[in-house]
Image (spheres, rainbow, N blue to C red):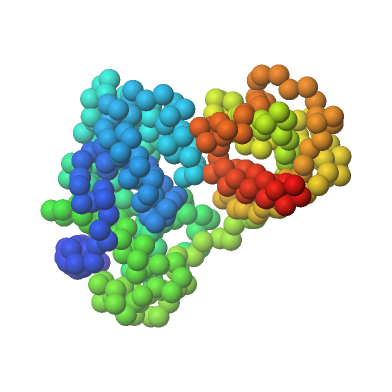
Amino acid sequence: MNAAQLQRAILSWYRQAARKLPWREETSVYRTVVSEFMLQQTQVKTVLPYFGRWMGRFPDFESLAAAAPDAVMHAWEGLGYYSRARNLHRLAQAVVRDGVPRTPAQWRELPGIGPYTAAAICSIAFGHPEACVDGNVVRILARLTGDRTLFRDSASAAKAFAPLARRLIEGCAEPGDYNQAMMELGATLCTRANPQCLICPVRGLCAAGRAGTAADLPRLAPKTVTVQEVVRVWCVKDDALLLHRHRNQSERLAGLHEIPSADQLGLAAASVARGRLLARKRRAITRYRITELIYEGRGSSLPPVGGGELVWVPLGELAGCTLSGPHRRWVGEIIGRLSRRASGSA
């Protein structure tokens, strides 16, 4: 494949078709770093309002580094994958202390920075010809080459296509725009389902496009889906809601509050299920398909609660309490429903 030809075609398209995004219209190393962290495993439309609020509250490395951990987590609430927020906070503190890294290798020494994020930051902010290889880029390269290899997962596919990605960015005068163009193409035209081959700027270079097989590539082995059920307990006493606060050592949810599960309260799920069912929620986290059942708890059946991971939060203070995104919604829904029910019966 001719790298120069691909670069010309995709950069020409990008200059005309690129979406107007706040981290592109006003650029800085910090804005690039924040956007890349937020965009990890999260769609652009979800990130946009969070990015604006974040920049209003933490406009630079210095303000983020000086922020309290709870303030950082509260600002991230609802975006999920909360280790990103903790890593971004630690990264800001390292940058303020040691200065802004300049090379991909230096960036990879910081919290939350892997090869993809280091390549994105260094190409966009510093013009390093470092190729980004994520799911979008893998999809484009598999289709350009017509590669029908069955990969075990996305990570193994990215590793396999990395040498080609590096070769295709060689000699590019605008590596940051090239990487963003590849990601933009994968997000808008060369999509997983229903690829828009007829209007693709690199259609003439694409083996799968010519063969009409783009929708079949890349080939990834099916994921194993694990089904889970979680029984949770809703308990309000003296105008306070009982919540479980995850330990700071928790990798995914450190410092966040959630409606406690029966296990966390030391109760048998079967005994909790004898109460009134307040909500049934379904969600997916990576390969897990989870059904959450929230039952009204009976105060007399609850174990003693005193400090530690189980806390009583006054209802009037819930807005300032950092909950995981789904639990914030569920708490609001249940309080609203119970309030309406109580008003109707009054």
In the figure, 261 relative to 229: above or below?
A: above
- In the displayed structure, does residue 26 sit left or right of residue 331? left
Compared with 40, 310 (above or below) is: above
User: Residue 158 location, x and y as percent?
Assistant: 41, 53
Residue 255, quarter of picture: top right
Q: Does residue 272 appear in the picture of this structure? A: yes
Q: Quadrant of residue 251?
A: top right
x, y percentage for residue 335?
65, 44
Q: Which residue occupies the foreground of this view, 326 or 336?
A: 336
Examine the rendering and report whether any part of residue 84 can be seen.
no
- Relative placement, left or right, of 113 versus 19 is right
Q: From the top left corner, tell me how far across and down residue 260 is, in percent.
A: 69, 35
Left or right position of 343 against 246: right
Which residue is painted at 58% across and 61% down in the image?
222
Name the residue furthest front: 346
x%, y% of residue 228?
A: 71, 49
Whether residue 183 is situated above or below residue 109 in the rendered picture: below
Instruction: Specify the quadrant of the image occupied by residue 199.
Output: bottom left
Q: Quadrant of the N terminus?
A: bottom left
Q: How many marks?
A: 0
Instruction: Please name whichever residue, 4 or 83, is drawn nearer the observer in this view of the structure.
Output: 83
Residue drawn at x 66%, y 19% is 307
What residue do we see at 25% from left, 72% from top?
201
Q: Measuring 35% from the left and 39% from the top, which residue is drawn there?
A: 54
> Quick one: 249 or 220, which is closer to the camera?
249
Q: Nearer the viewer, residue 12 or 315?
A: 315
* Outermost left residue: 173
